[in-house]
Image (cartoon, helix red, strand yellow):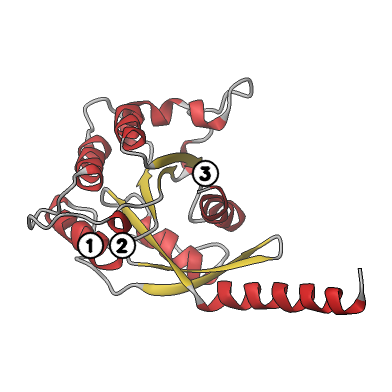
Amino acid sequence: MSMLAGFAVVVTEAAISFFKRIHAINFGVYGATMVGKTTLSHQLRTRGEVQTINERTVGLHRATRKTIKLDGDAHTIRSSDIGGEAIYWKEWVKDMQIRKPKYVIFMIDHRHLDSNANLDHQVAWKFLVDIVINDYWPSGKRKKEKDYPLAVSIWANKHDIWGDKYKLDKEKPMTKHEIFEPFSYGMKKLNDKGIATHKFIVSAKSEPDMVYRGITTMIKDY
């Protein structure tokens, strides 16, 4: 490789790196209340052990930029912290319609495994899937192509809490864990709409590398 060509490669790589840092990729983070959305937001901003957060998020908070770096690869993302109670689900729609996230993360924990009667995640998931795949916004406005996300991922959070009780089967891939079973039909509906789906297991409170890997995997693969 000539010196001139080598210089061009260095300049190109520097330009790409600079673009990744200033160009924020919109992520939408949704899920039932107390699932760890606020903890994830803190993890993306600070990296490390996040203090326990007991307060419930109220309404829709302003989207903020976070820069993540893993294995020398840096990306800047923008996400909002939004309440997970049903009265705030209209704010999920508002966030999706205004910011048009390229990637959507739906967070769950283990409550549906602890109790078959607990349908917090399933009900919220159905609401989210129906909104995403619908050709129209609730206002009646028809969606454009940019209104659909490239991928929707289910993140099974709090693995540090439930991991010993509901162990991963070493003979099976992580994506086959029982925690994801109730959401398979919704994922099929997303796939039928042409939207990619992804599964991930993480602890947003104490596993920053896994959090960052989940984000970068979505960006790279989808």
Sequence-wise, which precedes: disc 3 or disc 1?
1
**Callout 2 secondary element:** loop
Q: Callout 2 environment at 10 Å: few (<14), some (14 to 19), or many (20+)?
A: some
Q: Nearer the viewer, residue 180 or 20?
A: 20
Residue in the picture at 37% in, 42% down: 195
Marks counted in the figure total 3
Q: Position of residue 214 (x, y in %)?
A: 53, 50
Instruction: Report the residue marked by disc 3.
Output: 160
Q: CA distance from mark 3 to mark 2?
A: 32 Å
Image height of 81 relative to 165, above or below: below
Query: Does residue 116 appear in the picture of this structure?
Result: yes
Q: What residue is rendered at 35% in x and 58% in y?
A: 28
From the viewer's side, name the closer residue of 4 and 49.
4
In screen coordinates, is 90 left or right of 151? left
Image quadrant containing the N terminus = bottom right
Q: Secondary structure at mark 3?
A: helix
Residue 20 in picture, x, y percent from top left: 57, 71
Of pointers 3 and 2, the one earlier in the residue sequence = 2
Residue 135's place in the image compared with 82, above or below, is: above
- CB under 8 Å between callouts 1 and 2? yes
The Cα atoms of the two marked residues, 3 and 1, are separated by: 34 Å
Residue at (24% x, 67% y) in the render: 98
Residue corresponding to mark 1: 97
**Amino acid under label 2?**
Lys
Is residue 88 or residue 49 the one in the foreground?
Answer: 88
Choose top left, top right, bottom left or bottom right for residue 184.
top left
The disc at residue 100 is: 2
The residue positioned 38% from the left and 36% from the top of the image is 110
Pointer 3 and pointer 2: residues touching (CB < 8 Å)?
A: no
Which-is-in-front pick, marks 3 and 1? 1
In the figure, is residue 48 to the left or right of 41? right
